[in-house]
Amino acid sequence: MEMSVRWLMSLLMSLSVPSPVSAQIRLVGGTNRCSGRVEVYHSNQWGTVCDDDWDINDAAVVCRQLGCGSAISAPTEAHFGQGSGNILMDDVRCSGAECSLMDCPYISNHNCRHHEDAGVRCNLEETPPLPPSLCSSKSAVSPAEPVSLQCYRMSTIFKTVNINLYRNGRPVRTQSLSPSQSSVTFTLSNVDSSDQGRYTCAISPYSTHSQPISITVGEKHLSVELQKPSLSLETGAEVTWGQSVQMSCSISTQHLGGTFTLQQISGSFRDTKRVSGGSATFTIPQVDFIHEGAYYCQYQTQVSGRDFTSSRSNIVRFSVTVELQKPSLSLETGAEVTWGQSVQMSCSISTQHLGGTFTLQQLSGSFRDTKTGSGGSATFTIPQVDFIHEGAYYCQYQTRVSGRDFTSSQSNTVCFSVTVSLVQPNISVRAPDGGLFWGPQGPEVTRGHSLSILCSTEAQHQGGSFHLLFDGSNTTRTQSALNHSASFYIPELDHSHQGNYSCVYEVTVSRRAFSSNQTEPLTLIVKASLVPIIASGALCGLFILMVIPAVIYLVKRKSEEHTPQMISSAPSGSGSANTYGAPNRPGDTSENENIYMNTVELADNADDYKGAADDLEDDYENFKNSSTGIDNDYEEDAIYQNYN
């Protein structure tokens, strides 16, 4: 009921619309005179047309009216910019056969704004001989009514030509058309049943005719009102490429047995079904991108020999898309990659649209690589990994279907880090001036000697430095690496140098510092020197050996000075006694005994000292013999590795 009221109001208001002859139309904002925003002239002003129900049939009428050939498209939503002034036409519903836009049903009481201004794009570049276009002010007339038929040229002409009007294939009228004219009008006055038939027009001498128009002449008061049909989309509004789409058109009428037509608004798809009932189902079996867009349907039926067509149904739309699954990204190598090595990642997808491209993208970096895959996967290789390559990555798949590009969603992310793996360095010692031998716990060096501790490593990286760690004082010495080694020199060893030593190698790669593991500790033992003790013992023994002969000589001489003289024995009754010639002096006997005992004691002590000296000499000889068993070839370092 609301639609009926609206149409009655529109009919009343449309009485003030100028006739097709006086109406003016233009296209504004396009690249040429045959494309742009549609504007009509009414009441001394130009106004725009609302895009409600605007489609290719409306655009075809505008292009024909302007002599711009056929319609290419019917842009909406102010495609050529927003106009100004009044909006003069809304809900325009041309069938495509009208001579002027004003001949089409429309309403002037609009509910639009200028962001809904309609436009057209015509095929200006068409060249003859293209068939003309024929339109009629009426398709069903009563006897004695006039009918106007307009034949439009669809391309440029350069001389005056003749336009022939045909009825049922036979010429009935001829008019000339100059290059400045876009159409000619044939008027049939006081029509009767003989004027009924199929009309076409053609440009002489070409034989290509326009599309036919049927003119029926019937009872003057016969009228059939058909309701607006309803069109529904059986599938969703977004259809996957290659699938099928179904649309159902239905109408409520008593005049059954007619024909339903499904028409794509901005495309060439058109399908017709004749049914006995009040509905028809249309199927597009394999949807392509040319099928997406808006559709409407109409119902045509014949009553008492006259054809009647319903108004257009509501519009349904669907879009076509290619559904790509989420690809999968895997890391072929480990999650920790050594600097300078290669890393591989594989991106795969399950799809029927093969032959596309895979793209590997670093999530927070500049790395990007693209590979064309003939199958469903591609492998990406980073040949020499640096620190700028570490982080997270994802991949995507792009393919082209029917001239349109599609991209999958992002895959899962994989991450890897870059590290520098340094081998454990070596530690060794050498004694330039001797005094080094190996004991059960490691190297033993005599106190006072010099020592060099050598740190070395394999030739992995240039430069770097070595750190010598000493647990005896918790100090660290550092030397720059030269030919992948460094020497730490101790000029004179003492007991403060005794302890555990280890080496650490450090190098900077791409402005990032890396350190190796410590070597196993090298235990250094510092021993006292035996030479001063041996020398002291030898000197004491020599001194004693020199003193003893002197003492013996003095004792002997003293004894000779006190030797007694032999005298005769005086007869005596009591017996005889042996006496020395010199009488004994008081104290002489005891003094001589003391000297003798001291000399004997000195001689015994001298033997002891000599034995001690001999022992020291034997120890020294043993030390020398043991020392001669040490490899003192200082040109070759004694490397101590992994010593426990």
Image: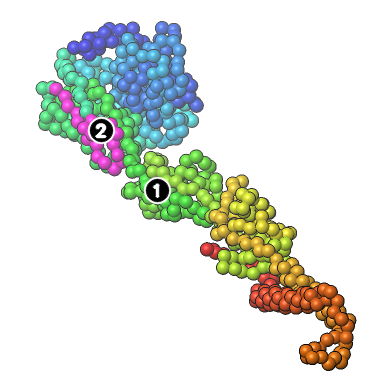
Task: Determine which residue is flagged by label 2.
Answer: 236
Q: Residue at x 86, y 76 (%)?
A: 585
Q: Is residue 538 left or right of residue 139?
A: right
In the image, which residues are magenta? Answer: 233-252
* Quadrant location of the N terminus in the rendered image: top left
Q: Residue at x 31, y 15 (%)?
A: 106
What amino acid type is highlighted by mark number 2?
Answer: Gly
Counting residues from the start of the chain, the first of labels 2 and 1 encountered is 2
Mark 1 neighbour density, 10 Å: few (under 14) some (14–19) many (20 or more): many
Query: Residue 448 shows which numbered tag?
Result: none
Asked whether residue 119 appears in the rendered view, the answer is yes
Name the residue type under label 1. Answer: Leu
Question: Element under label 2?
Answer: loop
Instruction: Give the residue at mark 1.
Output: 329
* The magenta stretch spans residue 587: no
Queried whether the magenta region covers residue 251, the answer comes back as yes
Q: Position of residue 612 (x, y in %)?
A: 70, 74
Q: Position of residue 383 (x, y in %)?
A: 52, 55
Residues packed near mark 2 inside 10 Å, few (<14), some (14 to 19) or many (20 plus): few
Give the answer, above or below, for where 55 lies relative to 8: below
Residue occupying image coordinates x 36% and y 14%: 112
User: Between residues 19 and 61, which one lies in front from this camera angle?
Assistant: 61
